[in-house]
Amino acid sequence: MNLQPPQPPAPAVGALLTLVQLERRAREAASAEALGFVMVNETLSLVPYRQAVYWSSAGLGHVAAVSGLPQTDPNAPYLQWLAPLCRALQKQHSAPAPLEAASAPGDLGEDWADWLPAQALWLPLTDRAGQPEGGLLFARDTPFSEHEQAVLLELAHAYGHALAAFRPGASPLQKLKRALRPGKLQKRLLIGLAVVCLIPVRLTVLAPAEVAPREPFLVRAPLDGVIERIFVAPSQPVAAGAPLFSLDTTTLQSRRAVAQRAYDTALEEYRQSAQLAVTEDDGRLKMAQSRGELDQRALELEYTAEQLDRVQVKAERAGVAVFGDVNDWQGKAVAIGEKVMLLADPAKVELLAQMPVAEQIRLKVGDTITLYPNASPTESYAARIVSVAYAAAETDEGVLAYRVRAQFQDGEHPRLGLRGTARLPGGWVPFVYYALRRPFTLARQWLGW
């Protein structure tokens, strides 16, 4: 028995295998973009062409893929010419349609030769229900035969079915419309919705909050200058009389040297005038003038010495140093009276919440608010409202908010500087008001009710 080598498949069998492979590639595409790449590039293995374009009908419609390009640029002149052509073809042709420049819709045929070969074929893509999914435009120099059109039409059915798999499901609004169709279910849903809307709930607002010092001591710059050194670290306990920071003394030392020389000069002039006053009458008058000049220079020297004694700032009482980073202050120029840091007692803290103006509710002194720290999701602290600011102030984030101060309950002393979210309680309101309060407020501001 003679074994013959396997014969190559007939052209029809080869085309069938290619068609099956393309349909499988379409089903295995991971996304609509990947499927578009397969349609415009890999269809070439079944039917020869020079250019291929995939038009997607999603939204207002757009060119989703072009053969030979990894991605499309909607601002490219080629795509700007293709978009109206594909949009018109989708409206005019619901079946495969051979095209050329003379049969192009409108005046698009005038620029046909600049963008496409002489012959083209439009293939609409639809899902199983016949809803349009877009279309494929193939172009080459020779017309497409009836056999090629039939094969491409069969492949277009598979492409349309694969595209329908990536279509988003029904929206919640569409599902709600189906659920609210006339019937018993509709009545039950409406009754349940009415009951839910009337359930009383507590109106609450979430606001950023921080554990702030109560009755802190403010440390200010004693005079104009540049901070030379910070002796303490943030959150470091300090004792009364401990040095906190010092200012640069270079300028003051120069002023003191000048004042000392001026004082020495005035003192020498006074001595000379005192000697002349013994023998001359004019010397007495000059001695009085020199005496006044000497007193003035002495005062200047004394004032400069006092300023030098004040360049080092010390703690007037014990506490914890509250300020930012040391590097933010060293070398920084400060003005007299400018705040540098706080001295706070860790045992005396309060809760400072920032209620945004857009979330304002009525709060009463004595109401309990709850702090949920950002760093400890399992902990919470209760505090009673002490005061609510009447005027809103701008926060560090640039938001207008009312300051709400609250005192922690006995035995609770959170760490100073702890940040988190405070829940501010209001009155009892129906659930429908709680859910639609913000939309109603925005609608009223926009409509001017």
Image (tube, rainbow, N blue to C red):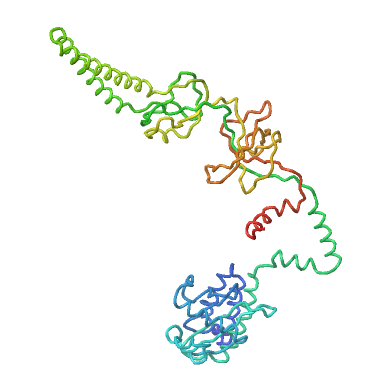
> What is the number of callouts on the image?
0
Q: Is residue 35 left or right of residue 444?
A: left
Q: Choose top left, top right, bottom left or bottom right for residue 215.
A: top right
Q: Is residue 203 left or right of residue 18?
A: right
The N terminus, quarter of image: bottom right
Q: Is residue 434 above or below residue 51?
A: above
Q: Choose top left, top right, bottom left or bottom right for residue 77.
A: bottom left
Front in this rendered view, residue 345 or 123: 345
Q: Is residue 192 left or right of residue 38?
A: right
Whole-percent x, y for residue 115 in the image: 44, 83
Whole-percent x, y for residue 414 in the image: 62, 30
Front in this rendered view, residue 10 or 95: 95
Q: Residue at x 60, y 72 (%)?
A: 59
Q: Residue at x 54, y 42 (%)?
A: 395
Front in this rendered view, residue 442 or 188: 442
Whole-percent x, y for residue 159 in the image: 61, 77
Whole-percent x, y for residue 444 in the image: 66, 57
Q: Residue at x 50, y 90 (%)?
A: 100
The C terminus, quarter of image: bottom right
Q: Is residue 445 above or below residue 371?
A: below
Q: Is residue 228 above or below residue 13?
A: above
Q: Residue lying furthest right in this view?
A: 184
Q: Residue at x 61, y 45 (%)?
A: 356
